């Protein structure tokens, strides 16, 4: 057979089509109708978007969040669409609270089929402004929170049927300047999640690790900023809003739910994140040296007082953050 450009392109196209057909078949096999999906951090942002997508596919929902008011807003929205929803206020960094939450969900629904660990915190600023407590808080929520939920929910998961979905980050594959506590905790979650996949495979429980890049969920208003807070908020909120740097969160939610149904091993979301992950795997030294240049270009300050994004006067024109602002309003980030 003579290989030319047309033959190569045609073969690759056929292989891609076959791959997508198999993936759709795998997703279709895992019918979500009537299944119980527990989502931590389900009251706003990506967690709420995932709840909407699981609800659209017929699942029953248990939403978990620290803020009871925001949580109730989310539950009311989903109930208005006919979804059976239980909202449970819980601080997932507290093991005793998590134990009670899981028992309450299991008692209410009689089963738990899918667990999505989405709850998280993010703090933006240079290392000079970060304290030991900042690292501890990031670990408590982003890593230990997911660990606590998994630890207490495992006895309720049915072998051969259950899914555990851990929302890590591209920051859990390559470290991002001015996000060091966040990246540290997400690296821990990624390592735990991939190792857990291997451990639980023999029980027929699929663990899916998700590493998204920037998504337009509207999260900058609830992120914590340190140092030159106006400048830090400016670069973070603009990057979070620009279409070529961030992806539409609704599309990300659909992709995550499909991955959970297929039982994928690892899903990296967003073209910049995929390119970054590939570059880091092939040329790690080059990526680190590039990060050094980025760090030098970012704001520098020693002000260690943290400020929420919603408390910062807008340092950039509104049109630069329009998409992120709309997402914040749509995804309960402003409650």
Image (tube, rainbow, N blue to C red):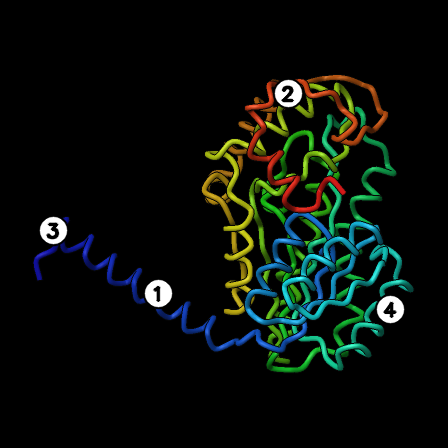
Q: Could you tell me if residue 76 is visible in this image?
A: yes
Q: Real-space Cα distance between discs 4 and 3?
A: 61 Å
Task: Kindly identify the residue that appears in the image at 55 percent across and 24 percent down.
Answer: 320
x then y, percent, for residue 7: 14, 55
Q: Quadrant of the C terminus?
A: top right
Q: Which numbered marker is on residue 4? A: 3
Q: N-terminal of the two: label 1 or label 3?
A: 3
x then y, percent, for residue 50: 61, 57
Q: Real-space Cα distance between discs 1 and 3?
A: 22 Å
Q: Which numbered marker is on residue 320? A: none
Q: N-terminal of the two: label 4 or label 1?
A: 1
- Looking at the picture, does residue 324 appear above or below residue 129? below
Q: N-terminal of the two: label 3 or label 2?
A: 3
Q: Is residue 175 left or right of residue 133?
A: left
Q: Which residue is mark 2?
A: 298
Relative depth, front residue between 245 and 250: 250
Q: Is residue 49 left or right of residue 301?
A: left
Task: Kindly identify the residue that appears in the image at 78 percent across and 59 percent down.
Answer: 64
x then y, percent, for residue 273: 51, 42
Q: Are marks 1 and 3 in contact (CB under 8 Å)?
A: no
Q: Could you tell me if residue 282 is visible in this image?
A: no
* Local secondary structure at mark 4: helix
Q: Which numbered marker is on residue 19? A: 1
Q: Is residue 80 left or right of residue 305?
A: left
Q: Quadrant of the N terminus?
A: bottom left
x then y, percent, for residue 314: 69, 21
Q: Which residue is mark 4?
A: 99
- Looking at the picture, does residue 86 appear above or below residue 286? below
* Local secondary structure at mark 2: loop
How packed mark 1 is, by other alpha carbons closer than 10 Å (few <14, some 14-19, many 20 or more), is few
């Amino acid at each position: 057979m003579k290989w030319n450009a047309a033959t190569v392109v045609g073969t690759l196209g056929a292989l891609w089509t076959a791959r997508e057909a198999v993936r759709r078949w795998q997703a279709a096999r895992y019918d979500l109708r009537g299944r119980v999906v527990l989502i931590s951090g389900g009251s706003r942002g990506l967690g709420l978007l995932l709840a909407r997508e699981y609800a659209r596919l017929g699942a029953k929902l248990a939403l978990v969040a620290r803020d009871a008011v925001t949580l109730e807003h989310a539950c009311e929205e989903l109930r208005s669409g006919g979804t059976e929803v239980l909202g449970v206020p819980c601080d997932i960094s507290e093991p005793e609270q998590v134990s009670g939450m899981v028992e309450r969900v299991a008692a209410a629904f009689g089963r738990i089929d899918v667990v999505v660990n989405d709850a998280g915190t993010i703090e933006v600023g240079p290392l000079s402004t970060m304290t030991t407590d900042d690292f501890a808080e990031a670990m408590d929520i982003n890593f230990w929170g997911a660990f606590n939920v998994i630890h207490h929910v495992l006895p309720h998961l049915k072998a051969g049927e259950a899914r555990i979905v851990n929302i890590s980050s591209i920051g859990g594959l390559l470290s991002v300047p001015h996000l060091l506590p966040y990246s540290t905790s997400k690296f821990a979650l990624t390592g735990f999640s991939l190792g857990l996949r291997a451990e639980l495979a023999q029980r027929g429980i699929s663990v899916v690790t998700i590493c998204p890049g920037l998504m337009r969920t509207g999260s900058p208003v609830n992120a914590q900023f340190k140092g030159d807070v106006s400048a830090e908020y400016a670069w973070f909120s603009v990057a979070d809003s620009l279409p070529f740097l961030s992806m539409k969160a609704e599309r990300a939610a659909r992709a995550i739910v499909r991955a959970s149904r297929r039982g994928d091993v690892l899903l990296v979301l967003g073209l910049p994140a995929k390119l970054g992950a590939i570059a880091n795997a092939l040329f790690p030294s080059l990526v680190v040296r590039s990060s050094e240049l980025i760090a030098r270009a970012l704001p520098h300050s020693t002000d260690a007082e943290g400020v929420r994004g919603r408390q910062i006067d807008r340092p950039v024109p509104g049109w630069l953050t329009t998409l992120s602002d709309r997402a914040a309003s749509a995804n309960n980030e402003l409650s």
